[in-house]
Image (spheres, rainbow, N blue to C red):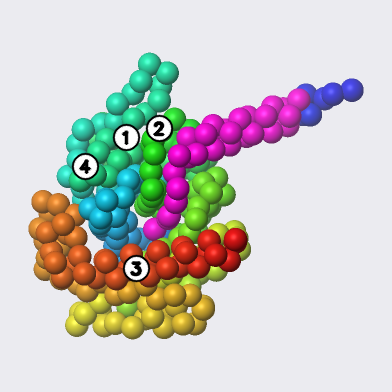
Amino acid sequence: MTTPQDKARLEAIKKNWEERRRISQRLSRIKTKIAVYSGKGGVGKTTVAVNLAALLAQDGSKVGLLDADIDCPNVTKVLNITEPPEQTDDKTLVPSERYGVKVISMSFFQENEEEAIIWRGPMIHNAINQFLQVTDWGDLDYLVVDMPPGTSDAPLTIMQTLPLDGVVVVATPQYLAKLDAKRSINMIKKLKVRVLGVVENFTGEMFGKGAGEELAREVGLPFLGSLAMRSDYRDNSKPTVLVSPAVRAEYEAVLIGMKASLQASATAKG
């Protein structure tokens, strides 16, 4: 005899399977899915994600950017984009676009950007799942995911739901940031997701340099490059790679390393 508990369990399994099927369909036309992630907030993860996406688009790739940092969605600010995504009759979201980058972010759905989004884990999980199920990205060479920081529900949800091709970990030169980045790398590895390498942000006289390279060496990962703390970032008119040759050169070096790591991963699988 089937009990109510059995029925509820079967319904939950059916719902989960249906969600995964819809997500798989939505992502089927995306060649490469990359997450940009950090063990703590404030290390410049969003800036790195936006500039990587903008540079990929500038180089001719078809690029999407998913702002999955539900609590503090800032991608739209860096891109200076205010036009919300279109919604079709069947509730499908068509991403907004700026600088050749298609964008979906929770910030499009906030009535007041200065109000905090105070959600518990299950609500964040549901929001991320909804974005993945209802967004029509079209044909993309790359989907860049700006991840929530830390090792709690939100990043876990993305890594377990979204079939990522790899993760770029952002660290800064300070000792504690290096420690947090190592914790996040260990979590990624436990989830069997490939870490493409480490980027060190905010290098220079103020915070020093070298911790990111040390971290990469300690955990056996590629070091993708350093991003200096520059006054160029004060120009908020565009992503900085589009206005500063020096910053662009640094990100081009990171992209070379990232693509090499993706190629090595593909070769290993093949």
Q: Which mark is residue 256?
A: 3
What secondary structure is the magenta-colored segment mainly?
Answer: helix
At 50% from the left edge and 55% from the top edge, which residue is drawn?
Answer: 165
Q: Quadrant of the C terminus?
A: bottom right
Instruction: Tell me the kind of residue under disc 3.
Output: Ile
Sequence-earlier tag: 3 or 1: 1
Could you tell which of marks 4 and 3 lies nearer the N-terminus? Answer: 4
Which residue is drawn at the image coordinates 62% and 34% (left, top)?
16
Q: Nearer the viewer, mark 4 or mark 3?
A: 3
Q: Is residue 63 left or right of residue 184?
A: left
Q: Is residue 28 left or right of residue 72?
A: right
Q: Amino acid at mark 2?
A: Asp
Residue wearing tag 4:
98
CA neighbours of label 4 inside 10 A, class few (<14), some (14 to 19), many (20+): some
Q: Is residue 20 left or right of residue 94?
A: right
- Magenta segment boundaries in residue numbering: 7-36
Q: Is residue 210 visible?
A: yes
